[in-house]
Amino acid sequence: MSMWRSVRPAGPARVLGATSFGAIALIIAFLLWDNEVPTAVVLLPAAFLALRHARCGVYVSDHGVRVRRVLRTRTLRWAELYAVTSRPDGLRALRTRRTVLWLEPLRGNPFPTPLSHRPNSDRTAYDRAVALLHTRV
């Protein structure tokens, strides 16, 4: 498995997020149509953000684990990963009781991933992702 593979397949939230970025870009472009601002100045960054949002997630390969967010990608080799934990998502967890998957590298601070679980949702996809990462660590 030398290719990067998502630990959680794309769901409706990811597709809706990418579509909303695109829709907002189109609305802004139509609002600026008569002005002197070129439409490409608005559409290109929005298209970039929509594409990045659609590809957010946690990916694994034989080489390591990669966490993609909208503005940043972080890659750890399996030898650099100390543990995979599941813990509350900071202050937001007080309101939502959301559990987030955290990666703990050997050097540096632990950081959250985009994988989360809410108490009222189906937990099977989250548990499969956690099990896949635990088998590698």
Image (cartoon, rainbow, N blue to C red):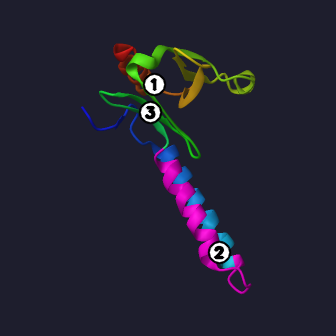
How far apart, in angstroms, are the residues tagged by discs 1 and 3?
17 Å
The disc, 2 or 1, on the residue closer to the chain's N-terminal end is 2
Image coordinates for residue 96, horizontal then vertical, percent: 69, 27
* Residue at (53% x, 49% y) in the render: 53
Start-end of magenta stretch: 31-55
How far apart, in angstroms, are the residues tagged by discs 2 and 3?
34 Å
Residue 119 at least partly seen: no
Q: Which residue is mark 2?
A: 29
The disc, 2 or 3, on the residue closer to the chain's N-terminal end is 2
Q: Write down the quadrant of residue 127 in the picture.
A: top left
Q: Which residue is mark 3?
A: 66
Q: Which mark is residue 64?
A: none
The amino acid type found where label 2 is placed reads Ala
Look at the picture and state if 86 lies above or below 6: above
How far apart, in angstroms, are the residues tagged by discs 2 and 1?
38 Å
The amino acid type found where label 3 is placed reads Arg
